[in-house]
Amino acid sequence: MQWIRALALRQRVGRLLSWVLVLVLWLGWSAPPAYATLNDDHFDGNIFPLYAGNGSLVPPKVTLAEALKRNRPVLLFFYVDDSSDCKQFVSVISRLDAFYGWAADFIPISVDMIPVKASYAPTEPGHYYKGFVPQTVILDASGKVVLDAKGNVAYEEIDDVLRDVFDLLPRSESVELRRRTVNEVTTELVEQGTKASKK
C-alpha cells in the first residue's frame, strides 16, 4: 500500500514540476526584451551616462540662478530621457563640455522637472524653455541669450557661438578638426593629418 502512495505522490510532483516548467518557459518567451537603443523613444535610464559617456553632467553642479551670479557663460540643455533626438544629441553636449566646461556652466534640464507655473523669472530654466526637446540655449556672461536652438544642432554651430562668447579665433583661422568615429554612439574631433584621423 505504501508503494502505491509513493507512486501517486511522485506522479503529482512530476505533473506539478511539468506545469511549473511550462509556465517558466511561457513567461520567458512572452516577456519583451529590454534593449537600450539610441534610435527609439523608450526610457532606458539617464541618457548622459548611457549615450554620452558623461554622467558627471547630471545633476548639474550649479543652478541657473547660481550660474548667473558667477558671471560666466551658461549652456542650458533641455531634454527628456525617452527621446531618440535627445539620446543622439547628448554626445554633442558632452564634447562641448570637454572643451568649454572649465569656463562655462553646463546645465542639463530634464523638462519633466520644470515646475508648471504661469510665468518664470529669468533665473529659472522655465523662462527659456520653448516646449520642445532637445533645446539648447546659451547665455553670455551678462545673461543675454546668444543662441536658442531647437533640435539636433551641429557641434560646429554651437562651437561658433561659444567662440564668439569667449573671443576665440574663428574656425577658419584655427586648426581644422575633423570627426572620427569612436564607437556607434560617440565621435571625437581630431586635428587633420594626425595618426588618430587616419584610422
Image (cartoon, helix red, strand yellow):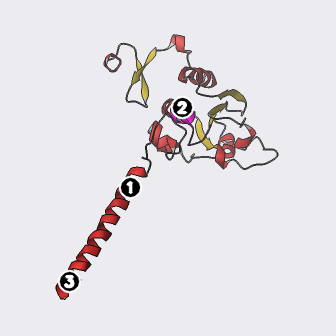
Displayed quadrant of residue 11: bottom left
Residue 92 in sight in this render = yes
Residue 93, numbered label: none
Which one is closest to the eye, mark 1 or mark 3?
A: 3
- Check disc 3 and report its element: helix, strand or loop: helix
Residue 70 position within the rendered picture, expressed as x and y whole percent measured from the top left: 65, 41
Q: Is residue 92 magenta?
A: no
Q: CA distance from mark 2 to mark 1?
A: 39 Å
Q: Which residue is mark 3?
A: 4
Q: Is residue 88 found left or right of 192 in the rendered image?
A: right
Q: CA distance from mark 2 to mark 3?
A: 70 Å
**Where 36 falls versus 176 (above or below)?**
below
- Check disc 1 and report its element: helix, strand or loop: helix
* Three-letter residue code for mark 2: Phe
Residue 73 in sight in this render = no
Q: Which residue is mark 2?
A: 89
Q: Which residues are magenta?
A: 79-88
Residue 26, numbered label: 1
Residue 22 position within the rendered picture, expressed as x and y whole percent measured from the top left: 34, 60
**Disc nearer the start of the sequence (2/3):** 3
* Three-letter residue code for mark 3: Ile
